């Protein structure tokens, strides 16, 4: 039995990616929901677990018309069981949306993750606060990457300069930058995403670049079962 379970896990290696930030409002939920659809678009089977008591992901799942991604509101103490369920369902990726409160719960979620994605805005206070979050990933010993979100085009040069500084200090910062785009804030309110609302738009293109960078960094691959999910444009 033990042997079969190992073979099963090797065939269906569920990748767990947590979105983490000690600062609120940086876009964890916006990026998690949009990335979920982007992964589905490339044929992966995706689950999205809401660990935030604010329950934004859960609300998104409730108004969403499509049954995918599979959305679950998991109390932290049951996270292990939900991840096991994800493996049994042969999901390829489980995204974990964590609360900004931090604490032992977030540490545990990170501990169970294969990769940690840390969204950050381009503001002065946001950049100053980033070390609080990267330190958790370092402490737990997980691979992580910072990504800049909700960037105003006039801040592009600042972001590139900060990115270089963070990289020089040893942090991994993604090339992909997601700009401030109305479709990103408007689509989540419909239980939808940029890719579904405006598949040829710039926001969709940026989310796909983010996805493609993560696929390489977190070594994400589709199991044999994966299907070409038809992401329906709105
Ligand atoms: N790239 C973006 N473009 C436009 N609005 C964004 C973007 N990212 C986040 N937002 C908005 O910023 C606010 C906070 O985002 P949210 O995803 O809820 O952050 P968090 O989950 O980290 O608290 C929301 O109103 C959301 O619509
Ligand atoms: Mg949130």
Image: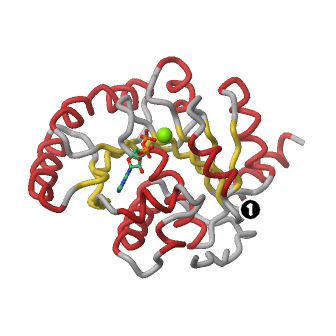
Specify the quadrant that holds the N terminus. Answer: top right
Residue at 38% of width from left, 73% of height from top?
A: 205
**Which class describes the residues within 10 Å of circle 1: few (<14), some (14-19), or many (20+)?**
few
Q: From the viewer's side, name the closer residue of 29 and 18.
A: 29
On the rendered structure, is 118 left or right of 196? left
Q: From the viewer's side, name the closer residue of 33 and 92.
A: 33
Say which quarter of the image contains residue 130: top left
Vertical placement of residue 91 versus 22, above or below: below
Q: What sort of colour scheme is used for the picture?
A: secondary structure
On the rendered structure, is 169 left or right of 212? left
Q: From the viewer's side, name the closer residue of 12 and 92.
A: 92
Residue at 74% of width from left, 49% of height from top?
A: 87
Q: Where does residue 28 sit, x and y in percent of width and height? A: 44, 44
Vertical placement of residue 160 versus 106, above or below: below
Q: Where does residue 35 sit, x and y in percent of width and height? A: 50, 59
Q: From the viewer's side, name the closer residue of 212 and 126.
A: 126
Q: Residue furthest right?
A: 1
Q: Residue furthest bottom?
A: 200
Q: Residue furthest top?
A: 104
Residue at 28% of width from left, 60% of height from top?
A: 179
Residue at 18% of width from left, 45% of height from top?
A: 167
Q: Where does residue 201 sit, x and y in percent of width and height? A: 38, 77
Give the labeled residue for mark 1.
67
Say which quarter of the image contains residue 139: top left
On the rendered structure, is 192 left or right of 14? left
Specify the quadrant that holds the C terminus. Answer: bottom right
Q: What secondary structure is found at the residue carrying circle 1?
A: loop
Q: Where does residue 91 sit, x and y in percent of width and height? A: 70, 56
On the rendered structure, is 71 left or right of 125? right
């Amino acid at each position: 039995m033990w042997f079969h379970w190992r073979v099963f896990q090797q065939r269906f290696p569920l990748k767990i990616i947590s979105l983490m930030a000690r600062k609120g409002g940086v876009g964890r939920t916006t990026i998690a929901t949009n990335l979920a659809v982007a992964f589905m678009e490339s044929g992966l089977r995706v689950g999205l677990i809401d660990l935030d008591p604010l329950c934004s992901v859960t609300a998104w799942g409730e108004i969403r018309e499509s049954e995918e991604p599979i959305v679950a509101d998991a109390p932290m103490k049951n996270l292990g069981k939900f991840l096991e369920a994800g493996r049994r369902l042969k999901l390829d990726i489980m995204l974990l949306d964590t609360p900004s409160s931090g604490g032992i719960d977030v540490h545990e979620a990170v501990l169970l993750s294969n990769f940690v994605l840390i969204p950050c805005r381009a503001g002065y206070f946001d950049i100053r606060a980033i070390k609080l979050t990267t330190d958790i990933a370092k402490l737990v010993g997980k691979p992580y990457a910072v990504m800049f979100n909700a960037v105003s085009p006039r801040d592009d040069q600042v972001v590139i300069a900060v990115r270089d500084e963070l990289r020089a200090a040893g942090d991994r910062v993604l090339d992909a930058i997601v700009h401030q785009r109305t479709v990103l804030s408007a689509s989540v309110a419909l239980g939808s995403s940029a890719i579904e609302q405006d598949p040829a738009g710039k926001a969709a293109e940026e989310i796909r670049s983010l996805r493609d960078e993560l696929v390489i960094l977190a070594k994400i691959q589709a199991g044999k079962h994966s299907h070409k999910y038809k992401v329906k444009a709105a």
